[in-house]
Image (cartoon, rainbow, N blue to C red):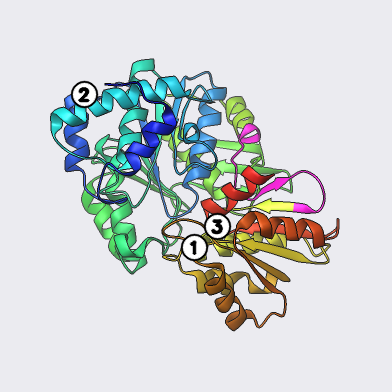
Amino acid sequence: MESRSLADWLAYLENLHPFTIDLSLNRVKKVKDNLCLTPLFPVITVGGTNGKGSVCAMLETTLSASGYRVGCYTSPHLLTFNERIRMLQQEVGDAKICSAFDAIENARLQSQVTLTYFEFGTLAAMHLFIESNVDVAILEVGLGGRLDAVNIFDADCAILASIDLDHMDYLGKTREEIGLEKIGIFRKDHYAICSEPDIPPGVQIKVDELGVKFFRINQDFSYSTQDNCQWNFYGPQNNVYALPYPALRGVSQLRNASACLAALDCLKDKLPVDNQAIRRGLVATTLKGRFQVLPGYPLVILDVAHNPAAAKVLAENLDQMGSSFPRTYAIIGMLKDKDIASVIQTLKNHIDVWLIGTIHSSRGARAEDIALLVNNITHSSEIHSFSNLSDAYTFAQKHASKNDRICVFGSFYTVSAILAFT
């Protein structure tokens, strides 16, 4: 097969399968079996509507701080595909990814199936983790859980970070229907951690039927704040006191950190982690686009919030920053299949100037359409539409004073565009 660059591979993968999203496991399992991809190391799978990226990041840094060789697979990426596959806290280089893609492609052809972009990437990540003999793999669910490609690998411990409304065309119209899809990553007799405090009754009934070792926040593990700089974790088996706050900003990060520590508590026989490694891991964790504050003035906040639940958390985080900012500029771009109106409604009292850009993707909503919703919901006199997000950012930088703040949100695409521009 001719040598391809990573850019060539990614362009090829985007058009390999007739559907961008195809929730099924038969095709990807055939290729996995053809390649004999059976990890001999512990696997931690992380799902949830929101919070799963933060949980993965904290797991990665904490296990790494304890000396383990960690493989971590997450999605989507912001700037480069390499962000999705990390080993030893480093993004895997182009050559290794291309080599893995080549192996996956040969097995795919032998299996006589097509694969989606995400399925191809999932198999490539595990191929690299097995080839490099990592000590543990962390896999982030792409969409849902039960039929997501990462679910072809059995999790020693599965974490469900949250259950809320998103991807409703694929997962269901209610929190219960969505939750039932998400708990598909749980395995009988294996550990299952849930940091969603409000579990729909039908989901809890199904969990009981699955026969998993289930640990639920506020019942089997919990946390308490000690003061403004320390907190305590009460685990399924062990407690840890006087912990530093996570470096990741935001009101939900203690809940995410608790899910991480509950999983490590359950896996302590396979992956022992001491309290000092936990402390080092919490303060060393970074994650682009999750209430990320850029240095300089005016203050710029990047947040990939793209559904009502995430918008609520963003609103709480903005409130927590205090009222010292004269004006807040919003740079927003969203996908048309998201609940745009609810996101605007949730944040309307936190934004003074709306700067709306078009995401140039087949799924992207036009700036004019979002602006119409903003006008109908907020009745603001300061709404501006732009053909692209970089123009919106330039406008904000020109008009905002050094004491104002600029909040970028609405999609991974939106944050990616601004990160690439700055």
Q: Quadrant of the C terminus?
A: top right
Q: Residues within 10 Å of mark 1 (few under 14, many from 20)?
A: many
Q: Please indicate whether residue 83 sits to the left or right of residue 318 in the image.
A: left
Q: Main secondary structure of the magenta part?
A: loop
Q: Are marks 1 and 3 in contact (CB under 8 Å)?
A: yes
Kind of residue indicated by mark 2: Leu
**Tag 3 residue:** 305
Q: Is residue 282 above or below residue 229?
A: above
Q: Position of residue 223 (x, y in %)?
A: 57, 48
Kind of residue indicated by mark 1: Asn
How many discs mark residues in the rendered view?
3
**Tag 1 residue:** 307
Residues at marks 2 and 1, CA–CA distance in whole angstroms: 37 Å
Q: Position of residue 414 (x, y in %)?
A: 57, 54
- The earlier-in-sequence mark between 3 and 2 is 2
- Residues in magenta? 282-299
**Helix, strand, or loop for circle 1?**
loop
> Quadrant location of residue 118?
top left
> Quadrant location of residue 331?
bottom right
Q: Are marks 2 and 1 in contact (CB under 8 Å)?
A: no
Residues at marks 3 and 2, CA–CA distance in whole angstroms: 37 Å
> Quadrant location of residue 370?
bottom right
**Tag 2 residue:** 35
